[in-house]
Structure formats: structure tokens, C-alpha cells
Amino acid sequence: MVPNEGEPIEILLAEDNPGDVRLTEKALDHGNILNNLHVVNDGAEAIKFLRQEGEYADEPRPDLVLLDLNMPRKDGREVLEDMKTDPDLRRLPVVVLTSSEAEEDVVRSYELNANAYLTKPVDFDGFVDIVKRIEDFWFSVVKMPPK
């Protein structure tokens, strides 16, 4: 289900690795769904963006958050905790997209109500495939709550 038919999907990518940001941008460009990708480089900025504070006051509320766990200032676990305790943010779907395969990260992410946990592939084709699957699943299969 596309949130607003004909309008681009708003995606927030919270990622501090410039290479992974570029891979995500390229992967989304290869996708079938019109989107606007917004990028923040640390967890503190992610929360400011989500709450539309400061320089992000005029930014749209994202339809989906792609969240790396290992970021400066505030890591992805802290972002999840903040989001899921905030009544205005807790319904936003969050896909943890990280390099960590640690079982404790997987368990903790789901305890903090992440909607999905995916490990980043190391090669471009794998990365494109996983981002396309995220896009297809969240915007073609899943029924999303209204904004």
C-alpha cells in the first residue's frame, strides 16, 4: 500500500557510513517506488528529524525509518527506545539495517519494537536486492496506518 497514491514515499535513513548511504541511494534509485530519501548521520539528528525540531521543522514525517545501530552521539538502540516511548513516533515502522549479526543486537532491537532486523549485505547487488525487498514489502504488501 502506497501511503498517498502518486506522492513519493518519505524514507528516513539514519546512517553514519557515507558508503552505505550511497549504496542505499543507488538501491532506492533502482526500485519501482517514487521516494524521497532523507539522511541523517547520527541518532541525535534522527530524533530531531522525527520530532521535526530545529532545522528539520519543515521536513515531512517519514513513512519508514531505516536505522543503523552503530552511530555516534545516540546509537540506533537509543533511537528505537526514544521512538517507541514517544506517542507521536511509536507507530512509525522501523527497519534496523545494520552490519551487526550479534544475537544480542537482534534480540534487543525486537525488544525495543523494531519492525524488522536486516544485516547489510557486503556487495552492491545484495544491497540493492535487500533495499528493493524492503521497499516492496513495506509499500506494496503491508497496510500502513494513516499519517
Image (tube, helix red, strand yellow):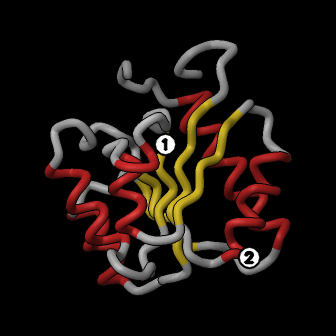
141 w.r.t. 64: above or below: above
Image location (x, y in percent) of residue 23? 76, 66
Q: Nearer the viewer, mark 2 or mark 1?
A: 2
- Residue placed under numbered mark 2 in the picture: 19
Identified by mark 2, the residue type is Gly
Q: Nearer the viewer, residue 136 or 88?
A: 88
Q: Is residue 82 left or right of residue 20?
A: left
* Callout 2 crowding tier (Cα within 10 Å): few <14, some 14–19, many ≥20: few
Name the quadrant of the C terminus. top left
Q: Nearer the viewer, residue 82 or 111?
A: 82
Question: Which residue is at 55% across, 57% downward?
Answer: 13
Identified by mark 1, the residue type is Leu
Question: Which residue is at 30% across, 83% downward?
Answer: 104
Which of the labelled discs sits on residue 39, or is there none?
Answer: none
Image location (x, y in percent) of residue 142? 49, 30
Tag 2 secondary structure: helix
76 w.r.t. 49: above or below: below
Tag 1 secondary structure: strand
- Residue placed under numbered mark 1 in the picture: 64
Question: Which residue is at 64% across, 46% downward?
Answer: 37
Q: Quadrant of residue 130?
A: bottom right
Q: Nearer the viewer, residue 147 or 119?
A: 147
Image location (x, y in percent) of residue 103? 36, 83
Image location (x, y in percent) of residue 35? 69, 35
Question: Which residue is at 14% across, 51% downward?
Answer: 85
132 w.r.t. 124: above or below: above
